[in-house]
Image (spheres, rainbow, N blue to C red):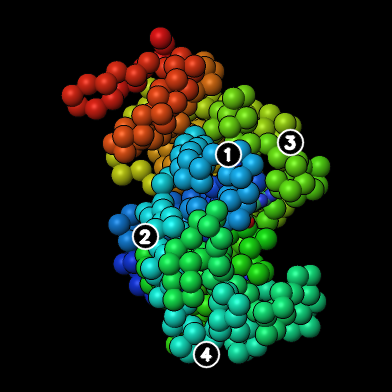
């Protein structure tokens, strides 16, 4: 059996991955703050950890992997968006969370096992803050509750920062009520015009970091196997999550492995809303299929920076066309029962989720299939291609439909039909109508029947 090796930000090294309990492998990834549409940089962690989720399910069994990716639906940026637009906070967060889900579905990202919302965990957050106050790790000051950083010796271990760097970093805004410049907010007061909940410290709202600590404990436990997110979250967000969770759990580790994806850049600058150099997933999917975007994203190793460009997308589309061409040539060959990904492919993905190496292996399989002469060999290669592709969330469409190039892939349409079903079950008819209109615009007809919704190409 091939060993899965993962790079751990904490140790700065790649090591064999061993879950605490192979029958319950746990992973948490910090999800979006829902105040605007996700850009393609925001999609990078969702996609990278989706591949790891698929790989873990392959290695440990589907029912043995529990993956939580949260929705941050309380945040000052959301409050500002509401004040600017005059729309209610819940309208904005609901719409943006729906859009995030359907955008990710279009990129072939599987729904995580749990998608906890911060606002649904206020009582857990308050309970954790109380524990931290009782243990002397937090203190109340001026309506705020702050975490006492000097009381936690391991602070800075994840980001490999020392106290001097920390103080220099925190000096930018040192509020007068902080005992130490590095102390951070667990709870803050809300004025009447801001969302707030009653608490022992008055009406207020949680800080961002404590939300993740509380949701991780509730859905996954005290020590989880893998914690992921973008590189920008290492400090202060993940450093603070560790401080809060460990101090409220008697010191046990929060995560065994910490994984961080590199930045997606545009002309070498990090793509970010504050710089303004963003391309939304919504815009991209108007001109490129979800699968092409996914392929482009996976063409770089997750820890490396990835410069996003139209050339990158064009190259991805060209390679996919070639691969689907191979599959089309194999269309007369039956998929063998019990097909498995090739060993070289699993070895590549197991080497710290090396997707460029895994994609190279897909190309090698195609090349071998194009030249193979025996049907037995071609069937074996077709099986490898279908199952290896599935682990990357690629090559699952009908080759002839792909090559016809109507721009729709089956996986994407299935995901949208499913998202519409969920919206209808939640009586969110604005969202379900929006999805139907989107599908109509793509030339897809929906037929609602007693046994669910069927779709077909053509209007
Ligand atoms: P946010 O909604 O800003 O909290 O970001 C959600 C996720 O996207 C976090 O894990 C960020 O680290 C990640 N992220 C944001 N911008 C980029 C980028 N340009 N490249 C890669 N990841 C990013
Ligand atoms: Zn988090």
Q: CA distance from mark 4 to mark 2?
A: 35 Å
Q: Which residue is mark 2?
A: 65
| Residue in the foreground of this view, choosing between 237 and 332 | 237
Image position of 187 with respect to 444: above or below: below
CB of mark 2 near ligand 2 (< 8 Å): no
Q: Residues within 10 Å of mark 4 (few under 14, many from 20)?
A: few
Residue at the (52%, 27%) spot, across then down: 324
The dot on residue 136 is 4
Q: Residues within 10 Å of mark 1 (few under 14, many from 20)?
A: few
Residue at the (48%, 60%) spot, across then down: 196
Residue at the front extreme of this rendering = 192
Report helix, strand or loop for mark 1: loop
Which tag is nearer the camera, tag 4 or tag 2? 4
Location of the N terminus (image quadrant): bottom left
* Residue 354 horizontal side relative to residue 450, left or right: right
Q: CA distance from mark 1 to mark 3?
A: 35 Å
Which tag is nearer the camera, tag 4 or tag 3? 4
CB of mark 1 near ligand 1 (< 8 Å): no
Q: Which residue is mark 3?
A: 309
């Amino acid at each position: 059996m091939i060993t899965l090796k993962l790079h751990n930000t904490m140790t700065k090294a790649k090591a064999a991955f061993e879950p605490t309990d192979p029958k319950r492998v746990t992973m948490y990834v910090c999800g979006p703050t829902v105040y605007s549409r996700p850009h393609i940089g925001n999609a990078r962690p969702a996609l990278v950890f989706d591949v790891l989720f698929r790989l873990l399910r392959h290695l440990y069994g589907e029912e043995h992997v529990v993956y939580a990716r949260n929705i941050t639906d309380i945040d000052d940026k959301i409050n500002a968006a509401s004040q600017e637009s005059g729309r209610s906070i819940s309208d904005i967060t609901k719409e943006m969370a729906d859009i995030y889900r359907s955008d990710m579905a279009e990129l072939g990202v599987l729904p995580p096992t749990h998608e906890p919302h911060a606002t649904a965990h206020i009582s857990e957050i308050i309970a954790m803050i109380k524990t931290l106050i009782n243990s002397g790790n937090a203190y109340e000051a001026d309506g705020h509750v702050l975490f006492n950083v000097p009381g936690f010796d391991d602070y800075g271990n994840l980001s490999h920062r020392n106290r001097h760097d920390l103080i220099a970093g925190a000096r930018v805004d040192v509020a007068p009520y902080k005992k130490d410049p590095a102390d951070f907010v667990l709870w803050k007061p809300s004025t009447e015009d801001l969302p707030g909940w009653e608490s022992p410290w008055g009406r207020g709202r949680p800080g961002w970091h404590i939300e993740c600590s509380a949701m991780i404990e509730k859905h996954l436990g005290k020590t989880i196997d893998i914690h992921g997110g973008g590189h920008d979250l290492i400090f202060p967000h993940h450093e603070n999550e560790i401080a809060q969770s460990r101090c409220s759990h008697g010191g046990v580790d929060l995560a065994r492995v910490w994984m961080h994806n590199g930045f997606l850049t545009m002309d070498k600058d990090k793509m970010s809303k504050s710089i303004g150099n963003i391309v939304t997933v919504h815009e991209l999917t108007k001109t490129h299929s979800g699968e092409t975007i996914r392929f482009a994203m996976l063409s770089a190793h997750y820890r490396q920076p990835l410069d996003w460009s139209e050339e990158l997308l064009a190259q991805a589309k060209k390679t996919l066309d070639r691969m689907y061409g191979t599959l089309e040539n194999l269309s007369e060959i039956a998929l063998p029962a019990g097909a498995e990904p090739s060993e070289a492919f699993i070895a590549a993905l197991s080497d710290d989720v090396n997707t460029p190496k895994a994609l190279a292996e897909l190309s090698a399989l195609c090349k071998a299939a194009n030249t193979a002469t025996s049907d037995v060999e071609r069937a074996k290669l077709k099986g490898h291609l279908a199952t290896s592709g599935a682990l990357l969330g690629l090559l699952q469409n009908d080759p002839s439909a792909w090559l016809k190039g109507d721009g729709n892939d089956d996986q994407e349409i299935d995901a949208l039909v499913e998202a519409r079903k969920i919206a209808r079950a939640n009586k969110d008819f604005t969202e379900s109508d929006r999805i139907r209109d989107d599908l109509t615009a793509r030339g897809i007809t929906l037929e609602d029947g007693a046994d669910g919704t069927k779709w077909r190409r053509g209007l």
